[in-house]
Image (tube, grey):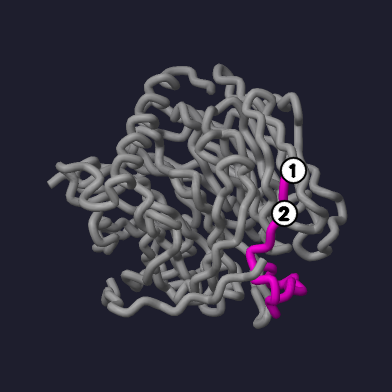
Amino acid sequence: MKVQKDLEQQSSSIPKSNTGLSRRSFLQAIGASAAWAATAQSAFAQNSGPTDSLASGQYLYVGTYSSPNTAPGGVVPSEAEGIYVYKMNLETGNLSHVQTVRDDNPSFLAVAPSKRYLYCVNELGVDDKGAPLGRVSAYRIDERSGHLTLINTRSTAGSWPCHCAVHPSGDYLFAANYGTGTFSVFPLGDDGDIEPMSDQYQASGNGSGPDPVRQEGPHAHMMLSNPGAEHVFGVDLGGDSILAWELDPATGKLVPGPVPYANVPSGSGCRHLVFHPDDNRAYVINELSSTIDVFDFNPRRGAFVWLQSISTLPQDTAYTRPSFNPDNPGEVPTGTNTTAEIRIHPSGRWLYATNRGMDSVAMFEVDPGSGKLTSAGWVQSQGQIPRGMNIEPSGTFLYVGNQNSDTIVVFRIKSDDGQLEGPLHIIDSPVPVDFAFGSFVRS
């Protein structure tokens, strides 16, 4: 591993702008999730000391684009080997390396509700005959050491899978294939193995979309359930749409929901979606327009009602929308910006988004009544192309991955106003893309 650096001085901030299904264990999984959330909220309320009096840390898993590949928007070939396992200090947020697992472009990760298994996409394209190479892989997590052991891998029957998620029941794995615009469903076995695909949905996109390079066809970018698990949603960047299904728990088949889709403004390029903890509001980050759309969400019908659009950039910004390079669509030319990740705090009071180009984290306050957002400023990501980020479950620390700088940056989230303090630590880690939190480390 490279040398770890603790920074004693805080970075300067950019000024504020002026402006429910299961075959086996759904009830048990929901109970475990509720217990986990209660523990996290208790720790956040205290905002000092470990989350669990017996815990000395928590395992953190980091996905990457691996060597010899070059990440989308990357400037040099990756030196990453696969998935990186760290132990997080619950008091300081610092990381210590535990294990490196060799794998092919494990760019996005998902941990099962039981914390016993980790899943990743293998973000691969096509072979020389045009056959898709995308895969999903399953790993067993050793409870004591945090180490990963491969269980199995399956084809996603698509190219460039860029996101995966586990259904709250722990019974199904979802994967979004960016290249082919398809959404895949896999049953999960009792031992965490990925079983043969049970369904796949082909998005239609917009035909020849508003952006001729990035929206020339459908591009599945995310697939997930809402917190109550009544519905499953697919985010299609190419179609500016959020697709809505119900999942048959017995067969793993997708059925169109009562309201089968919602839209974002034309050419926005929706990328990721997060739900408020109350399951009544939803937030969609748009990659191409650098905006966030806020929706009222009806969990019974799976319906989205638009409330607000807000920019992730300052009002007087000089950053513009890129003219994308068809040979490297992920490239962010100097002076331009695209967004990447969106996360909401466990308390539901604050929301955060990453800007690639401006290389910053945008902070927002969430109105407790309406759910609308108000800009709360920006902090520099301390590196280039902050693709992924995540908030650890207690809500105390935010981890940001600077893809092109090979660094993980740790910020503390202030408990009174959600502002980001730091960086507390900058950790050398090759091409960090996504973060997933595992079980607590028992001393």
Judging depth in this view, the residue of 417 and 150 nearest the camera is 417
How would you rate the neighbour count of disc 1 (Cα within 10 Å): few for under 14, some for 14-19, many for 20 or more? some
Q: Secondary structure at mark 2?
A: strand
Q: Report x, y in % for residue 321.
A: 74, 71
Q: Is residue 315 magenta?
A: yes
Q: Amino acid at mark 2?
A: Ser
Q: Report x, y in % for residue 103.
A: 42, 56
- At x 59% / y 28%, what residue is drawn? 198
**Is residue 416 rendered to the left or right of residue 21?**
left
**Is residue 210 rendered to the left or right of residue 166?**
right
Q: In this rendering, does residue 297 appear at all?
A: yes
Residue contact between numbered discs 2 and 1, judged by CB atoms under 8 Å: yes
Q: Which mark is on residue 255?
A: none
- At x 67% / y 66%, what residue is drawn? 19
Q: Amino acid at mark 1?
A: Trp
Task: Identify the residue position indicated by label 1 in the image.
Answer: 306
Judging depth in this view, the residue of 4 and 162 nearest the camera is 4
Q: Is residue 34 magenta?
A: no
- At x 27% / y 75%, what residue is drawn? 6
The quadrant in which residue 43 appears is top left
Q: Quadrant of the N terminus?
A: bottom left
The quadrant in which residue 317 appears is bottom right
Instruction: Report how far apart the C-alphas of labels 2 and 1 lie in the structure.
Output: 8 Å
Task: Identify the residue position indicated by label 2 in the image.
Answer: 309
Q: Report x, y in % for residue 335.
A: 67, 81
Q: Report x, y in % for residue 12.
A: 44, 79
The stretch in magenta equals: 307-329
Q: In this rendering, does residue 325 appear at all?
A: no
The kind of secondary structure the magenta stretch mainly shows is loop
Q: Residue furthest bottom?
A: 334
- At x 49% / y 48%, what residue is drawn? 349
